[in-house]
Amino acid sequence: MTAGPAAPRVSPWALSSFWAGSAFHWLLLLLILMPADVVRFVGEQQKGTYLGLLVGVGAVLALVMPPLIGTLSDRLGLRLPFLRWGVAINVAGLAVMGLASVLLAGAGLAGFWVYVLGYLLVQLGNNVATSPYSALIPELVPHDLRGRYSGVMGQLQALGQLFGALLAFGLGQLGLPPAVSYVLIAVVLVGSAVVTLSKVPEPPLKAQPETRPGDHWRWFGGALVRIVGVVLLLGAAYLLLARIIPGFSLIMAFSLPLLVVAAVVVALVLERRGVVSTTPSPLLTTRLMSVFLYQPFLWVFITRMLFSLGQYSVQPFLQFYNADVLGQKHPGTATSIMLACIIVGSIVSAIVGGRLSDRVGRKPVIYVAGSVMAVAAISLLFAPNFVAALIIALAFGLGYGAFVSVDWALGSDAMPSPATYARDMGLWHVAFVAPQLSSAPQGFLLDWGNARGLATGAPHLGYFIVFGIAAACFVLGVLLVRNIRGVR
């Protein structure tokens, strides 16, 4: 366990301001704008498949960028300049998405691919901004206050999401075009970044002295080229197998739980054989993947991945759930109301959960929070009406807020070395974004299950499958948190 500085050096509200803007950004984009825009581009029949594809393609970028940007930030000894440039790229991507949704909505797949390009720019910019920014909590906050700071961050994220949900509801009632939402997202994102940049000092870091500044950028370019090559190779292999093997996407969707279980089994075997250790070593600061040999980080990564997988099994399709299962005539508005209930619950529990974790430990809070989330995910499938679903959503929010309030504190506690905070926090962030890759097969699985359910007299079968996967991931994550050693 790494220790923070002797005293906090910045207000928790200023430190987490950009997280509020980012939460507002992603709620409106992922849950309101993108589902509606995809339907306009490709129609109702393939909405799940193409929305899953869009989210999955963006997740590839979010998967490879955080460790690279984090390592570059550690090498240069800088944090805040990445936030400035990342926000600029993010806003440029929002402009492309907004223009495509307005000017190319009737262009079919041609407009959709321009929209994808804008989304890739959004993902690139957001990851450039947030990877070094994530390192500020363990660098500036003492260990015994991380729960409080993490709770403030969770509360601000929830407030940003609530603002987004209420704004989406208001814009829907006014009938304003989607372009207005994209402009407002950019304004809020820039405003929150300005607060953080003006109130948070640059940490006193030192660039690595053994190389010249230009060498860092050459290293970054070479690493990025190699990783992009691997991603393109794997993508080509996926497309080839999908073309020659009937139902390959469906096989991938059903095999996803098995792959997760296999990863857990491998981690258990490595720990049993003594390959991983609770003692940091110099190797952890020199080789990227060796950080997984540090036992606390390994299990924090796996449990974070499971909770995120549960979240992304449901989140991209929540608007479709309101339309298909609950029969709401205005699914976008209904989704905004449901999200508001989730967020209100999370605001209530976020600050309490963070402070409580400083006293009783991180694990007990996660045990309760994850269990509540699992029960709520299953209960949504049996909600008799929209009002009942809103009550269940409120309960889910109570669990989610408590989890988020402890999540960053737990991750900060598990970092092996202060010398590589940005790299390791970026790598840990992969556990949050990598499950977005499941959206493509999950979207295919949703469409397949619903079609098969209509043919066999079991309507909404696809929703039962993906919501069930979400609940199973939450339960497994709760069970495995106990394996994290050195953290209460």
Image: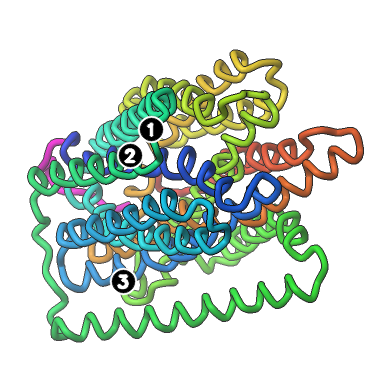
The stretch in magenta equals 1-11
Find out whether the residues at labels 3 and 2 contact each other: C-beta distance under 8 Å: no
243 with respect to 130 (left or right): right
Dot in front, 3 or 2: 2
Badge 1 marks a residue whose secondary structure is loop
Dot in front, 1 or 3: 1
Badge 3 marks a residue whose secondary structure is helix
Mark 1 and mark 2: Cα distance apart in space: 7 Å
Find out whether the residues at labels 1 and 3 contact each other: C-beta distance under 8 Å: no
Whole-percent x and y of residue 216? 22, 81
Badge 2 marks a residue whose secondary structure is helix
* Marks 3 and 2, the one that precedes in the sequence: 2
Find out whether the residues at labels 1 and 2 contact each other: C-beta distance under 8 Å: yes
The residue shown at (24%, 55%) is 87
Whole-percent x and y of residue 368? 52, 27
**What residue type is disc 1 on?**
Leu
The residue shown at (50%, 53%) is 299
Mark 3 and mark 2: Cα distance apart in space: 45 Å
Quadrant hosting residue 410: top left
Front residue of 20 and 5 = 20
**What residue type is disc 3 on?**
Thr
Label 3 belongs to which residue?
Answer: 285
**What residue type is disc 2 on?**
Val
The residue shown at (15%, 44%) is 196
Q: Which mark is residue 180?
A: 2
Q: In this view, which residue lies farthest toward the top?
A: 387
- Please tell me whether residue 26 is drawn above or below residue 399 in the rendered image: below
Front residue of 116 and 321 = 116
Quadrant hosting residue 347: top left
Whole-percent x and y of residue 4? 20, 49
